[in-house]
Image (cartoon, rainbow, N blue to C red):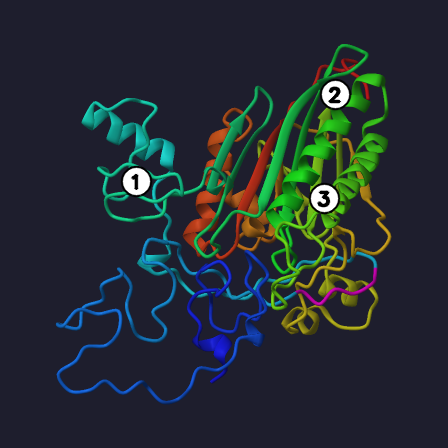
Amino acid sequence: MSQTHQLSACPGCEEPLETGDSFCEVCGYDLTAVPQPPDDRPTVAIGTHAPGTDPAGRPVNGHGGGAGSGADERSGHPPTADISAPDFGEGDSGEDTADMPVVRRPTADDYPLAAPAEAGAEAGAEAGADAAAKVCVACRAGRIDTDGYCENCGHAQPRERDHQERELASVAAVSDRGLRHHRNEDAFAISEAALPDGSTATIAVVCDGVSSATRPDEASAAAAAAANALLQESLPRGTHPQQALHEAILAAAEAVNVLAAQQAQPTEHDPHRHQNAPACTLVSSIVTGGLLVVGWIGDSRVYWVPDDRSGPPARLTEDDSWAAQMVAAGLMGEAEAYADDRAHAITGWLGADAYEIDPHTASFKPDRPGVVVVCTDGLWNYAEAAQEMAHVIPADAAQRPLHSAQVLVGHALDGGGHDNVTVAVLPFPMLPQGAGSA
């Protein structure tokens, strides 16, 4: 068995590892370069105790003394996903409609702790402590040190980005770490922009970090912020929403490219630390007047679901993926393409190592009210077909977008939550005839 299968924690940053990992997802440490440990064990004379233990054989430094003891017991992180590096390749996007492979069911250890704000508020109310003081979400008693660990039980506290929710008058979004990843690499931005004719444009941008890339969480955050900022600037000037979205995706790509020149940590003293270009995907939607505009790079999606369900729901984007490319080119049948191990490798993304960026955009004019669902594959893996998405989203989604986004995220977590999950829900109201313009 190779050393990468035996390591339980990264030698560089002590993050927990999964079997088969070649690089640490957090710091990029090259795990294949770690030498094998000797097969023999140190001999201990009779009547003496091993180094690092007391005479009774108990560890004196708070850690197990044997090989494979792993990271600091305080870490508290759930196991990370065993994710293979995507097989990037050239090609245009194609249609992706096959069922996703079944993922293993979660165990009790996979579920994340309660959100820190909730737990902290509850513990603070029970103890009558200062509202500003943080209380452990596990033991509900210990205070949190500057490193984010409980001083009482040593439990790592959830990070702020692990679960985020935001709601505006015309859009809501929820993002969650999921049950397998050790961090949330998704990001979103929602906003409203005033148009020259006095109407309002509703904006949702959702980005999914590429886990095999360095600092995917930074890439997704930078892309979402840059795209939203450009839309906020160009739409009030009267730029057509489809053109504005095209330019916003290019601005997001440039923001991610800038990260490639910024190393997160110095590597000159560590030859095993691996660095590559930060990368992410992006999908966005703009609702204004009677117009619905979508734009994307990668495999995140936009779905349309009518309010009354009298009309058929639809997927409005086509994945930039290997399987979709093979099917579109007529090189493989759908069943054969999606049975391949490379099926969900993306062929389009934002990053310094990406091919020439060619944003996909499209405009639609729905003939009835409905809701627009903008999401990462962490959701659509569990509701891939448009009919499945329509079945999962609540019937009153247009009136309760935040609740609907919460329900959709819950559906993904109940299904296994093997990836980060992010979804934005935008109601599409039908305006009176002649009202509004694009």
Label 1 or label 2, whichever comes before in sequence order: 1
Q: Quick one: 244 or 98, which is closer to the camera? A: 244
Secondary structure of the residue carrying numbered label 2: loop
Residue highlighted by disc 2: 289
Mark 1 and mark 2 residues within 8 Å of each other at the beta carbon? no
Residue highlighted by disc 3: 316
In the image, what residue type sits under mark 2?
Gly
Whether residue 370 appears in this view of the structure is no
Residue highlighted by disc 1: 137
- Residue pictured at 57% horizontal, 48% vertical: 185
In-image side of 22 versus 154 (left or right) = right
Q: Residues within 10 Å of mark 1 (few under 14, many from 20)?
A: many
Residue 318, percent across and down? 74, 51
Label 3 or label 1, whichever comes before in sequence order: 1
Secondary structure of the residue carrying numbered label 3: loop
Q: Quick one: 98 or 116, which is closer to the camera? A: 116
Is residue 315 magenta-colored? no
- Residue pictured at 66% horizontal, 73% vertical: 340
In-image side of 327 versus 120 (left or right) = right
In the image, what residue type sits under mark 1?
Val
Which SS type dominates the magenta stretch? Answer: loop
Residue 234, percent across and down? 81, 23
Above or below residue 53? Residue 150 is above
Whether residue 113 appears in this view of the structure is yes
- Residue pictured at 79% horizontal, 37% vertical: 251
- Residue pictured at 26% horizontal, 60% vertical: 62
The magenta stretch spans which residues? 86-91
Instruction: Give the distance between the C-alpha atoms of the residues marked 2 and 3, in whole angstroms.
Output: 18 Å
In the image, what residue type sits under mark 3?
Leu
Label 2 or label 3, whichever comes before in sequence order: 2
Quadrant of the rendered structure where residue 138 is? top left
